[in-house]
Image (cartoon, helix red, strand yellow):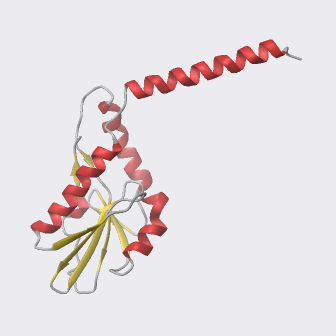
Amino acid sequence: MRSPVALSAWISLLVLATIGSLAVKDALASAPQVELSGKTNAAIAAALREQGFAVRVERHRFQSWIFFGTRGACRIAARDAVNAAHYSEAFREQMARVGSVRYLYRGNRSAGPPELTALVYRLVPRSLDRFGLHIARNAPVAVATSGGCPDGDFGLDRMTVAP
């Protein structure tokens, strides 16, 4: 059996290692997600306005903002879908009045959030961020459209943002 002093020393060492690891990660932080989300929001709003949509924003505290666009009989709802896997049910409920939610990422369309694919493609840019090399990255977008819209993705399927 180990003595209480030895156990205490091991616990102290583990705590110090954890604190050290967190300090290094903080010092080498990647581009803040808040900054990237803000740029994604601006890009979504700009893309919709460029296509003649009147845009209204619905801000959410814990999920991404929703951009509602209206152009004639076409209504669209679009939002940053970086953390969509955590909020997919909320996305579905909040965007249901426009239509069914689909997810757009890197030119592809899917019924579910592209969480794994987005994670893989974010690894390199996030790693480079830590060394001060900031490159553009694709942003997944959740979209719902009404029946009055043409079948298309309105340029939201290839959204890119740079820190």
Quarter assignment of residue 122: top left
* Residue that extends furthest to the right in the rendered view of this protein: 1
What count of labels does the image hold? 0
Question: Residue at position x 28%, y 82% from top?
Answer: 146
The percent coordinates of residue 16 (x first, y second) are: 59, 19
Quarter assignment of residue 58: bottom left
Residue 150 or residue 142, whichever sits in front: 142
Question: Residue at position x 42%, y 61% from top?
Answer: 113
Viewport quadrant of the C terminus: top left
Against 15, residue 150 (above or below) is below
The percent coordinates of residue 108 (x first, y second) are: 30, 62
Viewport quadrant of the N terminus: top right
Residue 128 shown left or right of residue 53 in the figure: right
Residue 55 shown left or right of residue 93 in the figure: left
The percent coordinates of residue 111 (x first, y second) are: 41, 69
Against 148, residue 134 (above or below) is above
Against 148, residue 42 (above or below) is above
Residue 111 shown left or right of residue 129 in the figure: right
The percent coordinates of residue 115 (x first, y second) are: 43, 54
